[in-house]
Each structure stands twice: as C-alpha cells, then as structure tokens.
Image: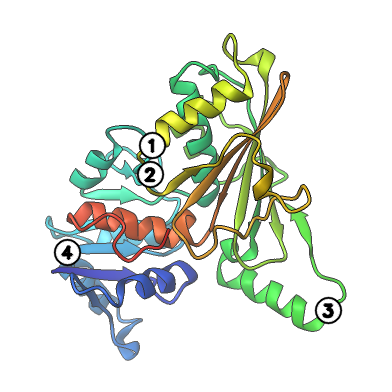
Amino acid sequence: MTNVFIDGQAGTTGLQIRERLLAREDVTLMEIAESSRKDPEERRRYLNEADVVVLCLPDDAAREAVGLISSNHVRVLDASTAYRVAHGWAYGLPELDAHQRENIRDAARVSNPGCYPTGFVLLTRPLVDAGIVPADAHLSCHAISGYSGGGRRLIERYQARRAEHPESLWHVRPYGLDLKHKHLPEMARYSGIGRAPVFSPMVGHFAQGMLTMVPLHTDTLGDGATPETVHACLEARYRDEPCVEVVPLRDDETLDAGFLDPLAANGTNRIDLFVYGHDSQIMLVARLDNLGKGASGAAVQNLNIMTGAEELSGLTL
C-alpha cells in the first residue's frame, strides 16, 4: 500500500490524478480536511508523512513544497515546470530511452514532462539518436492544444466565452509570441538537439486534445532520409511501448476529408505519432490528450513505475 498526498488536488491536473487513483486498492489517498487546507503546519505534516507526494502547483509553490519536506523517505513527483531540467531530478518520460524507466523507478525526485514537450521529444529524440536529425538541427514546432492546458483560469475564460458569445468563439489563437515559452528548456534538452526549436503554440476552442507538429526538409537531414526511413525509425523505437502508437505511414484512414482530429486520443494515456510527406519535405505529428499522456495520465504512469505497480494501472489506452 502506497500513501499518496496530492498537494494541489483541487486544480485541473490534481483532480484528474485523484480520479485515476480513487479506485486503486494499492493506493491510499491522504487528503487534508477542507477546514485545514490553508493550515501550513497541517500541510507540512502531510508532505512529510506520505510515501509519495504529487505536486500539482504553480512553479513557485512547488519549490516551496519541496522545501517543506524534511523526511528522507518521501518521494516527490512534480507536475510543474520547476524541476524539469534540474540536477537530481529524473525526467518522467518513460519512453525517452532504454534507461529512463529505471531512472524513474530509482529516483527520489521525478518531474512530470510538459504536454507539448511530450509530443516534440517523442517525435524527434529517436531521429537524433539515429543520426537522421543532426544533433545541432534548427527545428520548428507548431502545436495546438485544448484550453484546459492553461489551467482553471483559462478554462473559466473559454467557458464564459462560449456561454456569452457562442456566435464568436476564439477558434484558434496563437500565443507565446515572445518565443520564451516555459517548455523550451526541456524540449531542447530531451530531444537531443541542444537548442530550443522555434515554437509556435496555439489554443483552440475545445476543452482538451492536442496536436504537436514538426516540419523537416529532407536536405537538412542525414543522407538518404525519406518519410519511409523516418517512419521506420519511429516504428522500431516504439514497437514495444504500450502508450505510443506509430500510425502507418501517410495514413489516410486517420483523416477526415484530409483533416486530422486533435481530440481522437482524448480520455487515454496514448500518444499517436504520424509521418506524412514526400521526397523533399516531411511532417511529423504527435496527437495526445493534454490532460492524459500530457499531464495526469503521465503522472499516474510515473507513480506506478516509482512504486513498482503495474505501469498502466488506472490508465486507459
């Protein structure tokens, strides 16, 4: 039995983690009474009595929570951006390489990956490792996410817009135009390219779902790179990964009159990888639920690895 305390369980990610753990017989959820939620000493007690603390907090609050943990037996899984490239923290992407599950299993501190980086890294890292994408490549990444990725305040804004102005929804809105998105450091490090891509994220007027796209010119890649060799590389890398589905090359059956649905992986911990293109250009696409494999589902997957439970317990593919 593992005692788990979710610090920040009232937020979007925390609520979904809690939902995935409630029916588990191998997990006991430690929950502070509503009347004591703002009591700092009560919070400190819970942070130090749990076997695993899951932090679903803003970055500064996550750092504060870690600073309150004095017990050596407490392990931490942080869902914020605070520690994703920090020394001493394992990056919680089991599919990253052949050793990452072991790193997560043995770590006292694990940082859950971001939703956009999950797609970007899983698309590019095998290609960098295989020499298809140069390690110093200049890459771009375009992505669209459901508005739930922005947390409670953004959810409330989009829901209010739908209620008050259904005739004038915010269909697609680019943001991060200062090119300083908080996910860039982990995208650079864990893709293996060592530099941040030019990243253009967008929010769509749908609650959850995500597409992450990476365009490539074949004349900038390793010798002989084609859509076929890129697809074969991804397929070989993820053949035994239960949460990664490499869709057949140029798969038209997935498309709806030529359009790719960003919502089709919702409610799952699955990420779908696509390869499209021709002799001179390739488009890589990842599709995932930004609240599933992009957040809460990934956290439960990491928690399972950390505690020795069956890796997909509480998850849906």
The first of marks 3 and 2 along the sequence is 2
* Label 3 secondary element: loop
Towards the viewer: 300 or 13: 300
According to the image, label 2 marks what residue? 93
* Label 4 secondary element: loop
Q: Disc 1 marks which amino acid?
A: Leu
Number of other residues with Cα within 10 Å of mark 4, as a class: few under 14, some 14 to 19, many 20 or more: some
According to the image, label 1 marks what residue? 96
> Which numbered dot is residue 78?
none
Q: Disc 2 marks which amino acid?
A: Leu
3D distance between C-alphas at marks 1 and 3: 43 Å
Number of other residues with Cα within 10 Å of mark 3, as a class: few under 14, some 14 to 19, many 20 or more: few
- Contact check, label 2 and label 1, Cβ < 8 Å: yes
Above or below residue 75? Residue 88 is above
3D distance between C-alphas at marks 4 and 3: 47 Å
In the picture, measured across the screen, residue 220 lies left or right of residue 84, that is right
